Amino acid sequence: MTGIVLAAAIGYLLGSIPFGLVLTRLAGLGDVRRIGSGSIGATNVLRTGNKALAALTLLLDLAKGLAACLIGAIWGPVAMLAAAGAVILGHMFPVWLGFRGGKGVATALGVLIAIAWPLAIAAAVLWLLIAIAFQYSSLAALVAAVVSAIAAAFMFEPARAGLIAGIALLIVLRHHENIRRLLDGSEGRISFGKG
């Protein structure tokens, strides 16, 4: 039980590191929460116009999800799942930012790489296909999250499948404003081209 609690605490603290906010401030781009969706994630960092910084944010957010799971695994599979859930909660609800964090997509991918790598690959490919086809990062994230939850129910034991479904539900809930904008046609698009 001590290992599970430690894994969850470490996972939450790792998840709560706001890389998007830190990187944009270090780059002299100000507070990323004051632009676009107000999120601290890679998609909103992309709205600063700095694609390299957005890519670095994505990689670091992914890495903290993976790292939390690997650290949790030191205390066993249950602790790893506890760390996986906690790192998502830390990213979405960081104590340092008044519990207002990111949407959790990149961090969730890091978690999936650790606990369900075949599903992680499929989710990443699906996200990319939807994003390219429709140019909505939020739509791609929502589709990938829901499909991952459904697939996990058939691919993994109840503990992992339940965690993946819970993460997917949190991602959908964190995208409630994006869903509204998608429905009324005001959601911002992303571009994979130059410029």
Image (cartoon, helix red, strand yellow):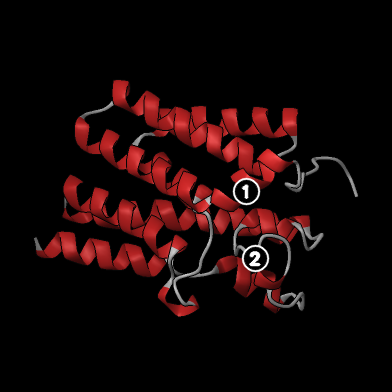
Q: Quadrant of the N terminus?
A: bottom left
| Residue depth check, mark 2 versus mark 1: number of the one nearer the observer | 1
Q: Residue at x 67, y 60 (%)?
A: 37
Residue that mark 2 sits on: 38
Q: Is residue 44 visible?
A: yes
Residue 13 appears in which quarter of the rendering? Answer: bottom left
- Report whether 49 appears left or right of 5: right
User: Mark 2 falls on what kind of element?
Assistant: loop
Q: Which residue is farthest left? A: 1
- How far across and down, in percent of the image, does residue 45 sit? 70, 61
Label 2 and label 1: CA atoms lie apart by 12 Å
- Other-residue count near label 2 (Cα within 10 Å), few / some / many at <14 / 14–19 / ≥20: some
Residue 158 x %, y %: 20, 32
Q: Which amino acid lies under the numbered mark 1 shown in the image of this protein?
A: Asn
Can residue 70 be seen here? The reply is no
Label drawn at residue 80: none
Q: Is residue 66 left or right of residue 33?
A: left
Reading the image, the residue beneath label 1 is 178
- Answer above or below: position of 33 versus 51: below
Front-most of residues 90 and 110: 90
Looking at the picture, which amino acid does disc 2 mark?
Gly
Q: Residue at x 66, y 29 (%)?
A: 130
Residue 15: x and y in percent read 42, 63
Q: Image point 78% across, 63% down: which residue? A: 48
Instruction: Give x and y (percent) for residue 181.
Output: 68, 47
Q: Secondary structure at mark 1?
A: helix
Q: Residues within 10 Å of mark 1 (few under 14, many from 20)?
A: many
> Outermost residue, right direction?
195
